[in-house]
Structure formats: structure tokens, C-alpha cells
Image (cartoon, rainbow, N blue to C red):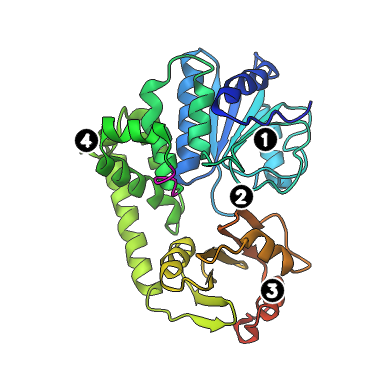
Amino acid sequence: MPDLRPHSPADVTPAFRAALERFAPDRPALILGHFDADGLSAAAILKRALDRTGRATEIRILGKGENPWSPAFRAELEARRPGGLLVADLGVRAGEILPGVPVALIDHHVPTGVPGDAVVISGNGWAPEPTSALLAWWCAQALGPADDLLWLAALGLIGDMAEGAGFPELAEAQARYGKTALRDAVSLVNAPRRTAAADPTPALVLLLRCESPKDLLKGGHSETEQLRAAKAEVVAALEGAKRVAPKVRGDVALIRFHSPCQIHPLIAQQWRGRLKDKIVLAANTGYREDWIHFALRTATGTNLISFLADHRPAGAGEEYGSGHVQATGGALRPADWNAFIAGIGFPEEQVPA
């Protein structure tokens, strides 16, 4: 079956209906989502909308180093025997996630391959570009009224820095729920995935339970306090990494540090505003054992996907170079990191292999 790539919000609803028609009705649909605010909100929208129709659903959020296209994850999926997969905010790559099982990919990142016969509902290349949560909200309208889930779509837009893109859905959500409440909710929802434990469960519980951002933020939910503690952990880690001075070679500024928290995208974004004529590369040697994780940001207009492709080391895998043209990154094993970092002019930043 060819990809059904929508070109406008009106195209999303029929594409999603077509995807669901392929699912086995006697087995639960399994929703896979990324563990950031956009991915979590997209997964919550899909589950809440599908649950209202009486369709059986399960949800699985992917965390540190997990990849739905990996052999290890395929084994888990085979044991679950889903009737279909709804994969939100996890990319569009070559190959089938689970052969013989219908898949719908809801995403907005730059595709890196053709995903078998999956239905692809992608906002990549649109102007402005909808996030996965907004795409999921448009999908939900194929199942019935979803107006009460608009605040979840707004969390995804704000979380993926699309607040200034001009989406009327976000303007409506801000008028209804308040800009500050939405921003504060995004800050909390994003916090757990950046901690050393990287457990997004409390955030997902709240997104499935609450009826508004103010409901999520108020007292009375034990999970809200867990999110506040996670945010404090991330703030403390950021304070240490902020003190690392960048090294500049040519067009690249490197900031390297060691933290179990996923703060490399935040550090890259902060330095992007200060080094407007550079490609900012924030590298974290402590996020995951035997890996170097890194994030790239730039204000120069350089296509960062192409930059990484031009400097791709021989052993780089699917963890390398996906995302957006102005916000990307990846993860490399030590030997591949050494080849990559020496190739862009920082041979002294190699690590023991």
C-alpha cells in the first residue's frame, strides 16, 4: 500500500481512517510514542480518542536509546501481538517495524527512508510544520469530537518550539487555557525524560487523566510532585553544564560535558542564541554507557541533516542524524565518535575506544 502523505489538515482524517481500517479488530491497537512533550501528548490524544470508540488500546512510550525499528524492540512487539501499530513522533525510516502488522506513522521529522507499506501521516515540509501532537489531534477528529483534547495538541506545539508558527489551534488553546499554564505544563511534562532515570510514566499518567493544563499543574496529583522533582534534577544538571566554555574551530562550536541527564539539546539551544554564526554541537559523554550523545543547533540556516550526512562515520546507525534541518543530533559508539569528531576538527576530543 503506498504512503498516504497528507498535504493539508483536511487530508489527515481520511488517511487516518484508511490506516485504522487495516487494523485487526479483535486485537488491541498498540500506540508507540516518544517520551518528550510532543510524543507523549500525541500518544495521549490517540489513546483517549480511540478509547471513546470502544476500541481496545495499549500504549508503550519509548525511552533512552530505544528504537522501534531495532531487533530487540521487534521481539517485544511480537510478544504483544498487536492488531496494529500507531507510531507517534518516532521518525520515518526504512523497513517494517513489525512485518505482517499494519502500521501508521504520525510524525513531522525529516524522513530517512521508506517504511515498508506503512501509512505515513507526516507534516514534514509543510509551512508551517505541524508537530506530531497536532497531527494526532487532527487524526482524532476522524473518530468523533476532540475539542476537549486541544490542550494536548498545544503542549506538543509549544514543546517542539512551534509556538510562533501561527497555528490557529494554538491561538485558540492559549485563549481558552492561558499561555502561562500551557507553557508551565510543557516544562513539567518534558522534565522526566531529561532525568537520569528518564521515566516518563508520571507525565503520561497526567496527560491521560487531566482535563486541562491547570488540572495537571494543581495540587492533588502525586505525579505532579514527581514532575517537579524531575525538573529540579534537570535544573541542577544544567547549572553544571552551563559553566563549560565552547571550543570553536571554523564553523563549529563544541561544548562537551558528562551528565546522566538529557541536557545536551538544552545546552545546544542556549549556545545557539549566543553563537549565531556557528553550528553548535553539545556532546554528552555521560547520558548512556558506551555512547556519546550529541545535539546540534544553529542560527546560520545551515542544513544540519546534510552536515551530519557529510560527516557520517562508517559505523553510524539509525541513532545518527535524524530530526529537523535546524535541530538534530544523534548517538555514536566511541570509535565512531572519534572518527566523527576528528573529522570536523577536534581530534583532541576523542574518547578511549
Q: Earlier in the sequence, mark 4 or mark 2?
A: 2
Which residue is more in the foreground, 134 or 71? 134
Q: Earlier in the sequence, mark 3 or mark 2?
A: 2
* Contact, mark 1 vs mark 3 (Cβ under 8 Å): no
Q: Is residue 162 magenta?
A: yes
Q: Earlier in the sequence, mark 4 or mark 3?
A: 4
Q: In this rendering, is residue 198 above or below 15?
A: below
Q: Earlier in the sequence, mark 1 or mark 3?
A: 1
- Residue pointed to by mark 3: 340
Q: 284 left or right of 179?
A: right
How far, Cα to Cα, is label 1 from label 3?
33 Å
- Residue pointed to by mark 4: 220
How far, Cα to Cα, is label 1 from label 4?
35 Å
How far, Cα to Cα, is label 4 from label 2?
32 Å
Q: Residue furthest left?
A: 219
Looking at numbered disc 2 in the image, what kind of residue is underneath it?
Answer: Glu
* Contact, mark 2 vs mark 1 (Cβ under 8 Å): no
* Contact, mark 4 vs mark 2 (Cβ under 8 Å): no
